[in-house]
Image (cartoon, grey):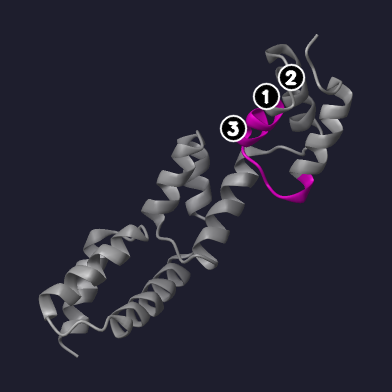
Amino acid sequence: MNSTCTPKEALQKLEHFCAYQERCHDEVVSKLYSLKMTSDEIDLILVQLIEGNFLNETRFACSFARGKHRIKHWGKLRITNELKFRNISSTNITLALKEISQEEYIETFEALSERCWNGIQEKNILKKRKKFCDYMLRRGYESNLVYEKVKDLENL
C-alpha cells in the first residue's frame, strides 16, 4: 500500500483539520488525496468525520456565507457562485443565504457603495460610474441594486 500514513492517523489529522475551521467535503477529499489515501479509505474517513460531526456541509455553507458577507462584504451572487464552485447543494446554499438578514445585507451594501463611490478619484462621470458598477458587481451584488444606487449617488 502506498499510504504515507494509516487511515487512523489520517482520521486524526482530518479531525484536527475540520475542528480548526469549517470545511466542505471537497477540501477534505483533496486533503485525504494529498495524504495518499485510497478511494475506499477516503469514503470510510468521510463517513467517520460526518458521524463525529467534524464535517457538516450545511454548517460549512452557513458559516461561509456569514463570514464572506460580514468580513469581505460579498453580495449574495458571489457567495452563491463560490459555494457552487465548492459543490455545495442548492438546498444548503439557500439555507446559507438565509443567515444574512435583509437589513444587514442592505446596510452592508449601502456602506460599501458609499465608501466605493467616494473613493473613486475619477473626474469623468461615465468612467466613475463604470468603475463603481464593475466593483459592486464583482463583489456579487445584484445588478438592479447597483444600478439604482449609482443613480442615487450621481444625484448627490
Front position in the image: 107 or 29: 29
Residue 139 visible in the current orientation: yes
Is residue 26 shown in magenta? yes
Q: Secondary structure at mark 3?
A: helix
Say what amino acid the circle numbered 3 marks.
Asp
Label 2: which residue? 37
**For the residue carrying disc 2, how many other residues have a C-alpha within 10 Å: few (<14), some (14-19), or many (20+)?**
many
**Magenta residues, start to end:** 19-33
Is residue 139 shown in magenta? no
- Residue 148 placed where, x, y %? 20, 71
Say what amino acid the circle numbered 1 marks.
Tyr
Question: Residue at left 68%, top 47%?
Answer: 22
Label 1: which residue? 33
Instruction: Using the numbered discs, state the Cα–Cα distance from disc 2 to disc 3 in whole angstroms.
Output: 14 Å
Decide if residue 141 is on the left or right side of residue 48: left
Label 3: which residue? 26
Residue 99 visible in the current orientation: no
Counting residues from the N terminus, which is met first, the one under dot 2 or under dot 3? 3
